[in-house]
Image (spheres, rainbow, N blue to C red):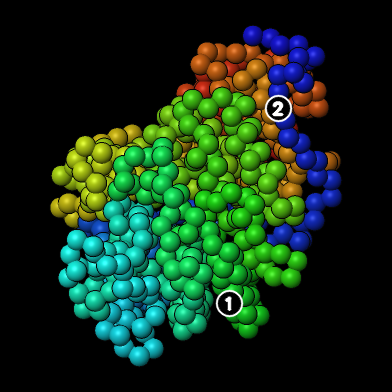
Amino acid sequence: MHIKGFALLALSVAFVLACKAPEENKKQWWETAQFYQIYPRSFKDSNGDGIGDLNGITSKLEYLKEIGVTATWLSPIFTSPMADFGYDISNFVDIQPEYGTLTDFDAMIKKANEVGIKIILDFVPNHSSDEHEWFIRSENREKGYEDLYFWDDGKDDPKDPTKRLPPSNWISVFRGSAWKWSEKRKQFYYHAFLDKQPDLNYRSPTLVQLMKNVLKFWLERGVAGFRIDAVPNLFEISKQSGGYPDEPVNPNEPDDQNYDHLRHIYVIDQPETIDMVYQWRKVLIDHQNAYGGDERILMIETYSEPAYSNQFYGNKTTEGAQIPFNFNLISRVNKNTNAEGFVEAIDAWMKAMPSGKTANWVIGNHDNKRVPTRYGIKRTDFMNMLIMILPGVSVTYQGEEIGMLDVELSWEDTVDPAACNSNSDIYEQFSRDPCRTPFQWDNTKNAGFSTGATTWLPVGETYTTYNVAVESATTGNSHLKIFKTLTDMRENKALQYGGYRYFSYNNVFILKRWIDGGDTILLIFNANSQSITVNLKDADESIPDNMRISVVSLESIKVIGSALGSSVQLAADEAVVATSVERKLFRYGSL
Ligand code: GLC
């Protein structure tokens, strides 16, 4: 199909920003970084127990460097009964024995420094484990610990005077009442997640200080920052401002055990949360002032609307989190999204982000279906191209670089509490196990993840196709080669400092990056279900003539290094990256 230039305005939605004067020396390391999330339990097992560990991570830091990762954030590695696989912490300042020791941690940091990879830890401030000594002491009403958690007498039970009812109708994220009765303390406690994850009370100054000490402990051991877990849940409406009122029911979700059954006006996104994040950033700034080194960063988990979440960046007088995660490409994009849908999802972040801030792009994590499963196998490479070529930082979840798929698990094999708290008919809606199976390193037993007889979750059946060794060794193209070429490309000034324009043209998504006096980089993706021919000059007359093909999606038959030409034919879901770069820049391209 050939569309004339005059139709461009009518058919396309575009967002353009020209960037003339690159202020290169003003960028901090993280502003041009490629982040990589490790789920430690499933990354690399060094001792054959079927569970990933710190020494396993240390042994693979060179791999991360090789694929162009700047910094890695680790899901929790701290002492835990593992009710929520590490998100239930019983000691915030020690390592889960299955994962190693503090000595192993120090060795990991040392190696990371040698290799040049920054380590970021998951900070889980909203709750502890019910096996944490703070909770045990609080339950025992020990002085100084009484109000570290939310305790309440609950209500009279009109049917039975010997019983108490929960203080409110609040529902846990993992289903059912968010209040649990403690026989010991004869009160209810609040838990936004599992009953084994009691919520910490940030209205207690003691608790605030204890958690700041946790940050300091890890900063002193050499981490580059933190990913902060479950930030929206941090504060609940204060008891002083009306007790624990019932939340209104959401009529669209009839299942009264489901979290979405209520509209969460009292338990998420309370105003005090913003200031708490500022206080944590201050801990990082103070540490940096005392010890020097590169800027320490906060990456925070938030799902809120921009009007609220933009405040996390900070304000005129106070610094906030550098990277409030942008999940728009997860929540607004799927297998069927058309080119305009991509433009809208990107706009939703770019137009709402305060000026001067750095965008970030997340397409997966340990809580969501994997990239090829969610967007379709054919769109996997495009999604990696997109997050690497859009302005800002990319965030990759382990396995996205090799196109790992979700692994289906039976109800019997399911271990994720989010699923186990439901039933065998609906568990797949909730289970996060499918995206947490062991990382696929090679063709050997257990995909090279572990030498053990079994692994904590089964290895995916497609591991002989999708693994690091096979995808590195192939003489043809692979997800991994595509990924590496893209991270190499991110050293180009056009991507780090350049202008950008993205738009849809005949349901083809086009993203252009350029720098004045320098290179142009182009990403073209055919979102149509049939092939199409695009006349580039009609789409954007400023696209240079000398573009060469640098990266193509796996099924593409285009030749790397060949001229892009002005008339480009694209198969359904085909994605192509072309550059005006004349010299040989990329390890895997043949320019
Ligand atoms: C966050 C984590 C999730 C965990 C929950 C409770 O949402 O990403 O994995 O279950 O917090 O800590």
- For label 1, count other residues whose C-alpha is less than 10 Å away and answer few (under 14), some (14-19) or many (20+): some
Q: Residue at x 62, y 27 (%)?
A: 340
* Amino acid type, residue under disc 2 in the picture: Val
Q: Quadrant of residue 132?
A: bottom left
Whether label 1 lies within 8 Å of ligand 1 gets the answer no
Q: Residue at x 31, y 73 (%)?
A: 153
Please tell me which residue lies in front, 10 or 370: 10
Image quarter hosting the N terminus: top right
Q: Quadrant of residue 275?
A: bottom right
Question: Which label sits on residue 283?
Answer: 1
Q: Is residue 34 left or right of residue 480?
A: right
Specify whether residue 76 is in view: yes
Q: Is residue 77 left or right of residue 6?
A: left
As displayed, is residue 440 above or below residue 90?
Answer: above
For numbered disc 2, what is the local secondary structure?
loop
Please tell me which residue lies in front, 439 or 408: 408
What is the x, y in percent for residue 170? 37, 57
What is the x, y in percent for residue 505? 68, 21
For numbered disc 1, what is the local secondary structure?
helix
- Label 2, label 1: how far apart the Cα atoms are: 43 Å
Specify whether residue 90 is in view: no
Question: Which label sits on residue 263?
Answer: none
Instruction: Give the residue pinned by disc 2.
Output: 13
Please tell me which residue lies in front, 219 or 461: 219
- For label 2, count other residues whose C-alpha is less than 10 Å away and answer few (under 14), some (14-19) or many (20+): some
Q: Residue at x 24, y 67 (%)?
A: 164
* Amino acid type, residue under disc 1 in the picture: Val
Q: Is residue 215 left or right of residue 165?
A: right
Q: Residue at x 61, y 20 (%)?
A: 507
